[in-house]
Image (cartoon, helix red, strand yellow):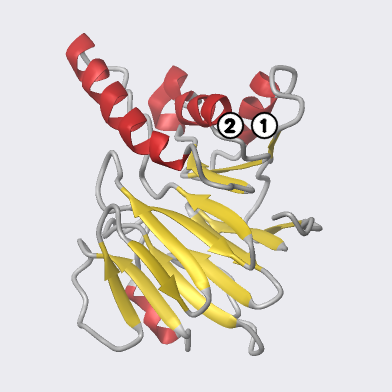
């Protein structure tokens, strides 16, 4: 399996038979000719969706229903808490603490989570009530992934949240069995991924927070058959 950080919240996941693209907004991207290619769009915000995805000759597009697009045979519109069996992969959508959906995808037997904007949005100016409401909302959605077989999670690590940048990763580390954690939504402040890794590397030595250094950074894995 190959996981590539493209830009902002866009990752691609390449397996023996599939090429998945999450929240593409630009950057170097070439679809392999011999694999099934599927775009995923978590929501309509411009840092997660660009109409240029339709310039690619992908096999299918799975797009949150808050995105205003024309219907087509190769487009599936999704809302929170949908389940799909499509072109040989299994997809579950859950909610977001902003707009749209988050994704769980089982592809070639491997579980992947892409959070979209499902994030612990605790802004510095939030009141106690705001924090309590976000805490309930975030956990109610994040907990839906608890019982899934997950290999990797792509999750927001947003420097605009100041001291609260780590909260989403912290919760998933504590509640999910995934071994690999991929920061996104960093607004090109990639050093925050190293900061996050340093914070948890001794607390969770069996789990890996990957450090992002540049666009089109590639991570390769040998997947055991039990995945």
Determine which of the numbered discs, if any, sits on residue 70 in the image: none
Q: In which quadrant will I find the C terminus?
A: bottom right
Q: In which quadrant will I find the N terminus?
A: bottom right
Q: How many marks?
A: 2
Does residue 87 sit above or below 214 in this rendering? below
Viewer-closest of 74 and 149: 149
Residue positioned 68% across, 70% down in the render = 15
Q: Residue furthest top?
A: 128
**Residue 108: image x %, image y %?**
64, 68
Viewer-closest of 17 and 22: 17
**Residue 154: image x %, image y %?**
53, 47
Can the viewer see residue 23? no
- Graded by Cα atoms within 10 Å as few (under 14), some (14 to 19) or many (20 or more), the crowding at tag 2 reads many
**Residue 31: image x %, image y %?**
59, 81
Residue pointed to by mark 2: 192
Q: Quadrant of residue 120?
A: top left
**Residue 39: image x %, image y %?**
45, 72
Does residue 73 sit above or below 218 in this rendering? below
Q: Is residue 74 left or right of residue 209?
A: left
Residue pointed to by mark 1: 194
Does residue 75 sit above or below 179 in this rendering? below
- Mark 1 and mark 2: Cα distance apart in space: 5 Å
Residue positioned 64% across, 83% down in the render = 32
- Graded by Cα atoms within 10 Å as few (under 14), some (14 to 19) or many (20 or more), the crowding at tag 1 reads some
Say which element carries label 1.
helix
Say which element carries label 2.
helix
Residue positioned 61% across, 36% down in the render = 177
Q: Quadrant of residue 60?
A: bottom left
Residue positioned 44% across, 76% down in the render = 86
Can the viewer see residue 212? yes
Check if mark 1's residue and mark 2's residue have beta carbons within 8 Å: yes
């Amino acid at each position: 399996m190959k996981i590539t950080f493209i830009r902002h919240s866009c990752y691609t996941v390449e397996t023996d038979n599939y090429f998945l693209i999450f929240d593409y907004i630009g950057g170097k991207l070439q679809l392999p000719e011999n694999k099934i290619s599927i775009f995923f769009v978590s929501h309509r915000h411009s840092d997660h969706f660009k109409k240029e995805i339709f310039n690619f000759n992908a096999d299918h597009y799975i797009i949150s229903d808050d995105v205003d697009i024309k219907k087509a045979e190769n487009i599936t519109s999704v809302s929170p808490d949908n389940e799909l069996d499509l072109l040989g992969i299994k997809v579950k959508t859950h909610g977001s603490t902003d707009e749209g959906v988050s994704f769980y995808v089982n592809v070639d037997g491997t579980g992947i989570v892409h959070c979209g904007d499902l994030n612990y949005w605790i802004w510095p100016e939030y009141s106690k009530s705001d924090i309590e409401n976000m805490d309930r909302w975030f956990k109610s959605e994040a907990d839906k992934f608890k019982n899934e077989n997950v290999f990797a999670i792509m999750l927001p690590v947003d420097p605009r949240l100041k001291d609260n940048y780590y909260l989403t990763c912290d919760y998933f580390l504590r509640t999910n069995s995934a071994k690999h954690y991929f920061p996104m939504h960093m607004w090109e402040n990639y050093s925050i991924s190293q900061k996050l890794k340093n914070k948890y590397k001794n607390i969770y030595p069996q789990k890996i927070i990957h450090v992002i250094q540049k666009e089109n950074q590639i991570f390769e894995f040998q997947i055991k058959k039990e995945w």
